[in-house]
């Protein structure tokens, strides 16, 4: 096919779409089901209507081929585990008794059965449920969900393409099941898994699928020759099916590197590749292997992870280059639109001109359609859209919001000394022990306490004008008093004020820093029914006034025990925001760090002796390719030290991380030079404690003994057992006792019981140590 005819054949598509609905209807229905207020039929009806609404929106916008199967009640990787029958033995009876309740039990756990481990989906803030596999795993095909959703879309008269997590990525994301040897490689199960995928693909073809998409994002990471050979074998075998849809293998989030020639040689009918800034090397690599003659290329030229308007002319140039490399070039976002909010036009509090800089899922869909139209019909067919796009890009580039001379001058003046504590850790530790006088195995929490209905109602009432600021502050003051009183009664050693005044650990700070924009409806799924509104980092960052000092010092006035000051670190402020794409991330991180440094210094001046600067996103933001790690970790750890290095030796600096593979960044954790780090460890059975010990980590650490992402209450014996396992790796004089994460999402009854058990466990083990 000629380039001209390939352009004429261009179509618009997406890989996935936000699941929650404009008003987060899915969240409300699922949580209503958990509470017994919504029955299963009503939940399924809500889900069905949301899928129908999404498909209709896409079709009406001009998307030619809609995705199916991307919708999920909780997580698409968990859905894949169900599809292939990889149900953990401890949940099998629950799944057999009731498929829906069993599904949620795997995600959330029950009092008798722990949930699947949860971790980050590549370098995003989306969390997936980790498959548990072993040499005895038996896979069985269950295509019910995929076939039903495809049939639903086809019945609406739409062209639809089922989307599945690919078999290689599924196995590469899996971990050995409990009781299985740690060195078991799930990829050895590939030959056992492929027939199950073959059955699902056959069922989809029978149901009317012309194409099926198999997502293989794990191939953008560094892969061994054996792993690449497994991918080649997988697609050679699947293509050999006699009755199947055409196969579109998709990758995203980064360049494919050595995997691109493997996929280009695979006898599949199409590839979907990322051609945004992060994966620009894919274009040259595709040309180097001779393109995809006779096959379909889906070009991800619209950034599916960020919210800035696309540079249409730049994307058209990329698409034009691709025309000669494939039989058919279609236009898409770089990845599923799951990672962006639904609709920017819903925002009423952002200045209209600035709003034109933003593209959420619906706006990105329009960009994709515009690009497909321009690719097929020429730039004259989209002249008005191109002119408007040029004006929006120029407006942003010339805005005073994006360039603050004072901020840039302060950032340029930073020296290496500014990011270094005045004394080495051993001397600081001695000063802190003398000052704080904490017991062996000190107990604390990560920061937040339950955000009750009353708190959320008070916040909504303040926004709506139903109460004034004085009434709202009285409610916050009372909540802090209750939180402090509970912690003292329970016997915790280092207290927190509970963060009653905070809507979100990033948004709260973003709303008080210049350069950030906050949304009202920009919800994005983090995990399950947990949705967040990432703020938009639009311009240069500074701190006009203190942000946390008032409430922290009020809490300290209520107790003689130390109360931690609580801040979100600079890397997490970037990772959980939509960051600007017009300057290096390192420059932005330094600006945020300097603003937070001012807050840390003000907290110390106000009498706060323990300050926690959370960096749960440090591992999450790690580049997917190892060759890119050193540069990132250098500026990321410097930003943390720049935030915290200005305090006295006897001020104890804590940090916190959760739900990530920490083994990859143990040296970076060391380089942060925090005095104490708390980490997720309950679901991973103290794996991080062993990793810290193997590295020779010299500071204090609190590997969590209470999994807060599950409603189950761990008993004191269970917490004590985890604590003893932690002691096998970390000496008692350097071990803290704490939950895995903040308690914001938990209810008060389970929080009270769990923390009481945590303190009991610490006291039990202290006694054991004193008598041993």
Image (spheres, helix red, strand yellow):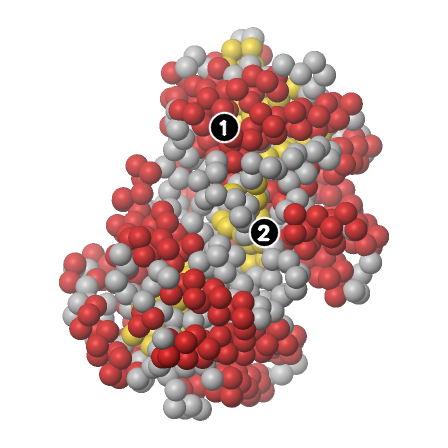
Between 68 and 658, the residue placed more toward the observer is 658
Residue 745 placement, left or right of 578: right
The circle drawn on residue 233 is none
Residue 228 placement, left or right of 127: left
Inspect this view and state whether residue 372 appears.
no
Q: Residue furthest top?
A: 1
Residue 273, placed above or below residue 706? above
Q: Do the residues labelled 1 and 2 touch (CB within 8 Å)?
A: no
Label 1 crowd bin: few (<14), some (14–19), many (20+), radius 10 Å: many
Label 2 crowd bin: few (<14), some (14–19), many (20+), radius 10 Å: many
**Mark nearer the N terminus (1 vs 2):** 2
Disc 1 and disc 2: Cα gap in Å?
30 Å
The structure residue drawn at horizontal position 50% and vertical position 78%, both measured from the top left corner, is 760
| Residue 646 percent across, percent down from the top left | 22, 71
| Residue 326 percent across, percent down from the top left | 52, 15
Residue indicated by mark 2: 116
The structure residue drawn at horizontal position 76% and vertical position 36%, both measured from the top left corner, is 144
- Give residue 104's quadrant in the image: bottom right
Residue indicated by mark 1: 273
| Residue 730 percent across, percent down from the top left | 34, 63
Between 750 and 184, the residue placed more toward the observer is 184
Residue 34 placement, left or right of 517: right
- Give residue 138's quadrant in the image: top right
Residue 504, placed above or below residue 293? below
The structure residue drawn at horizontal position 30% and vertical position 84%, both measured from the top left corner, is 437
Q: Is mark 1 on a helix, strand or loop?
A: strand
Quarter in which the C terminus is drawn: bottom left
């Amino acid at each position: 096919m000629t380039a001209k005819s390939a352009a004429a054949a261009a179509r618009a598509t997406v890989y996935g779409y936000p699941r929650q609905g404009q008003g987060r209807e899915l969240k409300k229905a699922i949580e209503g089901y958990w509470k017994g207020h919504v029955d299963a039929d009503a939940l399924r009806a809500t889900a069905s209507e949301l899928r129908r609404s999404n498909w209709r929106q896409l079709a009406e916008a001009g998307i030619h081929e809609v995705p199916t199967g991307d919708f999920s009640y909780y997580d698409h990787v968990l859905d894949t585990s169900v599809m292939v029958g990889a149900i953990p033995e401890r949940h099998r009876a629950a799944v057999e008794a009731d498929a829906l309740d069993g599904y949620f039990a795997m995600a959330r756990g029950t009092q008798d059965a722990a949930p699947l481990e949860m971790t980050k989906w590549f370098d995003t803030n989306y969390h997936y449920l980790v498959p548990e596999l072993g040499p005895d795993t038996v896979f069985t095909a269950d295509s019910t969900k995929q076939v039903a959703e495809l049939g639903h879309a086809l019945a609406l008269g739409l062209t639809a393409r089922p989307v599945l997590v690919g078999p290689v990525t599924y196995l590469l994301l899996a971990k050995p099941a409990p009781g299985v040897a740690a060195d078991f490689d799930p990829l050895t199960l590939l030959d056992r898994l492929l027939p199950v995928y073959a059955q699902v693909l056959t069922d989809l073809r029978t149901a009317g699928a012309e194409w099926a998409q198999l997502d293989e994002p794990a191939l953008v990471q560094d892969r061994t020759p054996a792993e690449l050979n497994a991918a080649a074998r997988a697609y050679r075998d699947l293509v050999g099916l006699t009755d199947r849809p055409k196969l579109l293998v998709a990758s995203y989030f980064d360049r494919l590197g050595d995997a691109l020639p493997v996929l280009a040689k695979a006898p599949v009918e199409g590839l979907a590749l990322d051609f945004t800034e992060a994966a620009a090397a894919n274009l040259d690599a595709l040309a180097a292997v001779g393109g995809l003659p006779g096959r379909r290329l889906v070009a991800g030229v619209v950034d599916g992870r960020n919210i800035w308007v696309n540079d249409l002319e730049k994307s058209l140039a990329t698409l034009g280059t691709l025309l000669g490399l494939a039989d058919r070039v279609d236009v898409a976002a770089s990845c599923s639109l799951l990672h962006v909010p639904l609709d920017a036009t819903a925002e009423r509090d952002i200045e209209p001109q600035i709003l034109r800089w933003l593209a959420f899922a619906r706006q990105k869909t329009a960009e994709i359609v515009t690009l497909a139209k321009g690719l097929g019909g020429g730039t004259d067919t989209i002249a008005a859209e191109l002119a408007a796009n040029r004006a929006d890009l120029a407006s942003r580039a010339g805005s005073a919001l994006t360039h603050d001379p004072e901020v840039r001058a302060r950032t340029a003046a930073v020296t290496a000394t500014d990011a270094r504590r005045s004394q080495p850790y051993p001397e600081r530790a001695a000063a802190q022990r003398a000052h704080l006088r904490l017991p062996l195995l000190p107990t604390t929490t990560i920061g937040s306490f339950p955000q009750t209905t009353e708190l959320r109602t008070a916040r909504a009432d303040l926004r709506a004008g139903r109460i004034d600021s004085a009434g709202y502050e009285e409610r916050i003051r009372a909540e802090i008093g209750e939180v402090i009183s509970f912690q003292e009664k329970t016997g915790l050693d280092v207290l927190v004020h509970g963060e009653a005044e905070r809507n979100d650990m990033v948004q709260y700070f973003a709303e008080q820093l210049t350069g950030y924009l906050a949304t009202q409806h920009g919800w994005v799924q983090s995990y399950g029914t947990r949705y967040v509104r990432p703020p938009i980092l639009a311009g240069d960052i500074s701190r006009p006034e203190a942000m946390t000092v008032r409430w922290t010092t009020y809490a300290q006035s209520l107790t003689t025990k130390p109360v931690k000051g609580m801040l979100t670190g600079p890397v997490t402020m970037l990772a959980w925001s939509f960051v600007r794409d017009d300057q290096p991330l390192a420059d932005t991180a330094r600006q945020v760090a300097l603003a937070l440094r001012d807050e840390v210094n003000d907290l110390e001046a106000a009498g706060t002796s323990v300050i926690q600067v959370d960096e749960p996103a440090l591992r999450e933001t790690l580049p997917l390719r190892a060759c890119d790690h050193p540069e990132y970790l250098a500026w990321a750890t410097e930003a943390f030290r720049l935030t915290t290095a200005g305090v006295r030796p006897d001020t104890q600096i804590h940090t916190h991380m959760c739900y990530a593979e920490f083994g990859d960044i143990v040296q970076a954790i060391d380089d942060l030079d925090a005095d104490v780090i708390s980490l997720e460890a309950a679901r991973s059975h103290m794996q991080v404690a062993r990793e810290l010990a193997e590295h020779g980590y010299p500071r204090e650490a609190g590997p969590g003994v209470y999994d807060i992402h599950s409603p189950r209450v761990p008993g004191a014996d269970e917490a004590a057992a985890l604590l003893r396992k932690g002691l096998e790796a970390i000496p008692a004089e350097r071990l803290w006792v704490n939950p895995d994460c903040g308690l914001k999402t938990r209810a008060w009854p389970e929080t009270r019981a769990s923390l009481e058990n945590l303190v009991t466990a610490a006291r039990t083990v202290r006694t054991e140590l004193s008598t041993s």
